[in-house]
Image (cartoon, rainbow, N blue to C red):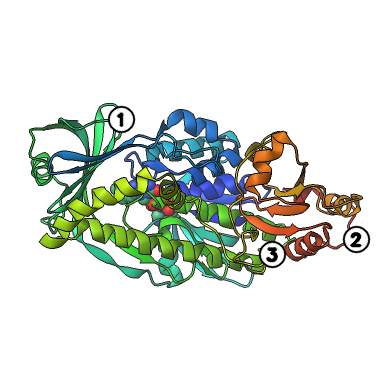
Amino acid sequence: MNQNFDVLIVGAGPTGLMMACQLLRSNVKFRIIDKNSSPAHESRALVIHPKSMELFQNLGISEVFQKAAKRSIGVQVVVHDKVKVDLDFRNIGIETTPFPSIYFLSQAETERILTEHLEKHGVAVERGIELASFQQTSEGIAGQVFESAHLEYSDFRCHFLVGCDGAHSKVRHILGLPFEGAPYEQEFLLADLELKWPFAHDKLSLFLGSKGIMAHFPLTDQISRLIISANKRKSEEQPTLPEIQDAIQDFVSVPFQVSNPVWLSRFHLHHRIVPTYQKGHAFLAGDAAHIHSPVGGQGMNTGLQDAANLAWKLILVLKGIAPESLLETYSQEREPVGRKLIHTTDRMFTAVTNSHPWIIHLRDWFFPQAMKMILSSAQARKRAFHFVSQLAIHYHENMFIKDTENSGSDHHWAGKRAPFAETAQGSLFELMKGAKFQILLFNNPDGNGSELQDIGLLYRGLVQIHSFQENNQNAELFKRYSIQGPAVFLVRPDGYIAFHSKGPGLSKLKEFLQNIFSFIPQHVQMLPDEIVL
Ligand SMILES: Cc1cc2nc3c(=O)[nH]c(=O)nc-3n(C[C@H](O)[C@H](O)[C@H](O)COP(=O)(O)OP(=O)(O)OC[C@H]3O[C@@H](n4cnc5c(N)ncnc54)[C@H](O)[C@@H]3O)c2cc1C
């Protein structure tokens, strides 16, 4: 693969595949490689959160995911064989997303759908190709890959390299970035098998016991996934069915039967993060940058959002219209998200797996009560789901996120996720599909339309403009965006608000656009086709 190209994506897990699906929407020349000769069949992540579904919708593939996935299943908490909490999350009551559910789909299926989307657009994952080495050069990156089919090394050069190569990331090692954090003490057993017992098969059930926690997920109609916290490592070998049986008995005392083991494994969990997601022309995304316990099903979803945050920035810089400093906002925005996630999952995980008898006693009483309390209040339920669903993630102001309203005020929107609403023209998110920036105008802020005409002409191909007037059909939209008078929003391709201003006039928006697209000369009549998004 002795070639020059723009971006090398290392790793075709969910993060790398999302990065490729995003880059596909531009004429950026990229390659995606994976050291494995075939996709993984075992499923790790099972949960797709609403914010990821919004990304899929923007790519035009949310229907495929909706068809393939199970829409939220019930959740139970079981202590000493008794069901203490039984909840249904089919609709989590959040109106600001078109996907107010948690979706269950095996990671293998998620990867298959993303791979097929790439193939449909003529991009193949290059399998059996392993990143061997690279160094930063004055123009970007130069390195070598190992091709297992021919048992040979070959050279490559690219402008940017994105390490989506998982927890043991080679890219991270080569960059010399520390993976700060620690392992958890406990060992975990994973078992995908047929299970006959008196508890519900179709629910996500959490069993609290003296050894920690056992989680049950319905993988298929027949197969269950169990994740069981167990005593310290007995051996490195794959667990046996009798060992799994013993481990289950630590959590339930009713009779049960296990058979047909599809995947048995033991693993240790870590909570770790890199201090920065960028070094020179190389970036880290997904598990290569952060790992944590699977509590809350956040890992894969966070990797998908990392990729969506970085991709459009790479595209603008590679097209030569935005300054390289835009790329620095990737780590500035995403590293705090990863760090907060590690902190919260660590606290939850430590609470449920603590082995001190008093704490266990307290946990067995407190955990189901707390869950019931939170989820019986519509407000608390919404807040909890806003966090878990990744819809509450927002970014702080930086060079490329600006608001004319004070931060802390209810009208400060920049950095927040653009909320969904139905409009007179249909679903707002359907209108905003695609790779372009979206300008949302409310109540005609540009009286005679001259500034809007300038923006439309200069940034034709980079922005899409939508105008909304106050009427019954737009009532929901105006309420969600707290509109009282003229206002303008600029939404980025990853669904976050880059700019917001209230009042008449678009001069501040023009200034902001000049700041992002600072390499477009202001006298240009029309952008050349290769610049169009
Ligand atoms: C038991 C379990 C349950 C989980 N449940 C959930 C859940 O419900 N929800 C959730 O969001 N997350 C969950 N996770 C986490 C989730 O699986 C990961 O966060 C996700 O796989 C990360 O995706 P990734 O693309 O960043 O990395 P990976 O999926 O690890 O992909 C990395 C890819 O890079 C390739 N690669 C590595 N080195 C090289 C190299 N040198 N050259 C070329 N290719 C290379 C690998 O072959 C691999 O294909 C779970 C994890 C576990 C272990």
Residue 331 badge: none
Under tag 1, what secondary structure? Answer: loop
- Mark 3 or mark 1, which is nearer to you? 3
State the residue at coordinates (43%, 72%). Answer: 177
Q: CA distance from mark 3 to mark 1?
A: 50 Å
Residue 523 badge: 2
Image position of 478 with respect to 366: above or below: above
State the residue at coordinates (34%, 58%). Answer: 345
**Does mark 3's beta carbon lie closer than 8 Å to ligand 1?**
no
Q: CA distance from mark 2 to mark 3?
A: 30 Å
- Mark 2 or mark 3, which is nearer to you? 3
Q: Are marks 3 and 1 in contact (CB under 8 Å)?
A: no
- What residue type is disc 3 on? Glu
Dot 1: within a 10 Å radius of its alpha carbon, few (fewer than 14), some, or many (20 or more) residues? some
Q: Earlier in the sequence, mark 3 or mark 1?
A: 1
State the residue at coordinates (19%, 59%). Answer: 186
Image position of 313 with respect to 69: above or below: below
Under tag 2, what secondary structure? Answer: loop
Q: Nearer the viewer, residue 278 or 363?
A: 363
- Residue 107 in the image, given as x and y percentages of width and height: 39, 41
- Residue 167 in the image, given as x and y percentages of width and height: 36, 58
Which quadrant of the figure has residue 424? top right
Residue 220 badge: 1
- Residue 297 in the image, given as x and y percentages of width and height: 37, 48
Badge count: 3
Dot 2: within a 10 Å radius of its alpha carbon, few (fewer than 14), some, or many (20 or more) residues? few
The residue indicated by pointer 3 is 405
- What residue type is disc 1 on? Thr
Q: CA distance from mark 1 to mark 2?
A: 59 Å
- What residue type is disc 2 on? His
